[in-house]
Image: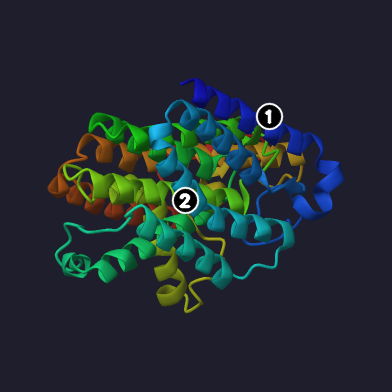
């Protein structure tokens, strides 16, 4: 617990230092593009919150490992595996010159190292069409790489509003840590707890005013750790259903898969081309009616911050059942099916302007 408090305070302090010194480094650290399809901030904001997150987690995990040297090899190796994803994302935040392919290769490198050094492979799925693939070492490694890349990019995709991705990761990592604690996997439980603490430290500075952004570095670091800890928990604990991490992360995964389908099939556009019709974007435009038409920065920031709680609930609606039925693949399959149908139904109703009135938040200028 001491290490968690230390990580939280460290991440918050580093984030505050970045914010307070923004005028010095804004020319290379700030997100000054206010016109993109997924840009909803009203002023240039530092997008290197991943530095605070990584520093907070690093110092917390070192603190804990020094007191538990028997686990230092595992946590140190996991940390090294996460660095390629973090560095590639941070370099993109600073230079805007790292291509999606280069970032993907960095993710895959880290996942491959984790598969080799830590045994982070997917050897069971409880999905009939995929289980034959996991029978071979190559198939188990390939599936692990695919999952890590998918989950990590899904966290980056939902990182669109103040506190959205970070609090969703807090919810999912908390669920992961709780189940790890229940089954007696203290190392994964502690790693999850320390990630939650560092993320909360950054969240306290980010939300609700949006003073600092998670950035690609932070989103990639969070997504990579979330994916790897889920894979490692299932690999080391046979009683945990392999569908547990999938349902736990249902919100960002479903958002990503549906976005790919929407772009490619419905709109005939490249799957990796950003658009402004994610579920969180639609909620901002059609459910949050606060200060509609206003260009006042303070009003826009408030409208931005009112969006994330809707999606925190959406994330929790999958995470809570996943934690309840963590050892039942049948129950988790039903939960996932219901969740997907609910997501599609809600998206369709918002697009068709048929949103239930009780979901709409109105305010000044609305």
Mark 2 sits on what residue? 223
- Can residue 347 be seen in the rendering of this structure? no
Question: Is residue 142 positioned above or below 91 on the image?
Answer: below
Marker disc for residue 277:
none
Observer-nearest of 78 and 355: 78
Left or right, 19 with respect to 215, comes to right
Relative image position of residue 244 (x, y in whole percent) = 26, 46
Q: Earlier in the sequence, mark 2 or mark 1?
A: 1
* Image spot of residue 252 (x, y percent): 42, 52
Give the quadrant of residue 248.
Answer: top left
Q: Distance between the residues labelled 2 and 1?
A: 22 Å
Q: Is mark 2 on a helix, strand or loop?
A: helix
* Res 321 → quadrant: top left
- Which residue lies at the image location 49% right of the left edge and 37% below the top edge? 167
**Toward the viewer: 323 or 305?**
323
Q: Where does label 1 land, which residue? A: 13
């Amino acid at each position: 617990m001491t290490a968690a408090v230390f990580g939280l305070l460290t991440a918050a302090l580093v984030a505050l230092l970045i914010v307070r010194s923004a005028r010095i480094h804004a020319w290379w650290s700030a997100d000054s593009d206010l016109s993109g399809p997924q840009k909803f901030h009203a002023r240039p904001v530092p997008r290197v919150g991943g530095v605070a997150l990584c520093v907070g987690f690093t110092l917390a995990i070192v603190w804990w490992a020094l007191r538990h040297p028997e686990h230092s090899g595992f946590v140190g190796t996991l940390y090294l595996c996460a660095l390629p994803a973090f560095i590639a994302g941070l370099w993109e935040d600073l230079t805007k010159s790292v291509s999606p392919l280069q970032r993907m290769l960095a993710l895959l490198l880290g996942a491959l190292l984790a598969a080799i050094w830590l045994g982070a492979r997917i050897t069971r799925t409880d999905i009939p069409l995929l289980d034959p693939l996991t029978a071979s070492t190559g198939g188990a490694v390939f599936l692990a790489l695919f999952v890590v890349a998918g989950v990590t990019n899904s966290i980056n995709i939902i990182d669109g509003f103040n506190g959205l991705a970070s609090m969703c990761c807090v919810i999912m990592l908390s669920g992961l840590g709780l189940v790890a604690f229940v089954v007696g996997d203290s190392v994964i439980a502690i790693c999850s707890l320390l990630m939650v603490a560092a993320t909360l430290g950054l969240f306290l500075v980010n939300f609700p005013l949006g003073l600092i952004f998670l950035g690609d570095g932070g989103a990639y670091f969070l997504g990579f750790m979330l994916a790897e800890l889920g894979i490692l928990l299932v690999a080391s604990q046979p009683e945990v259903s392999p569908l547990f991490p999938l349902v736990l992360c249902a919100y960002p995964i479903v958002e990503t898969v549906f976005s790919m389908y929407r772009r490619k099939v419905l709109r005939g556009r490249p799957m990796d081309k950003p658009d402004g019709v994610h579920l969180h974007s639609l909620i901002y435009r059609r459910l949050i009616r606060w200060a509609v038409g206003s260009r006042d920065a303070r009003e826009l920031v408030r409208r931005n911050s009112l969006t994330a709680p809707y999606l925190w609930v959406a994330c929790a609606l999958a995470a809570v059942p996943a934690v309840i039925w963590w050892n039942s693949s049948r129950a988790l399959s039903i939960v996932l099916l219901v969740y997907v149908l609910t997501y599609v139904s809600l998206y369709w109703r918002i697009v068709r302007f048929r949103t239930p009135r009780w979901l709409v938040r109105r305010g000044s200028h609305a």
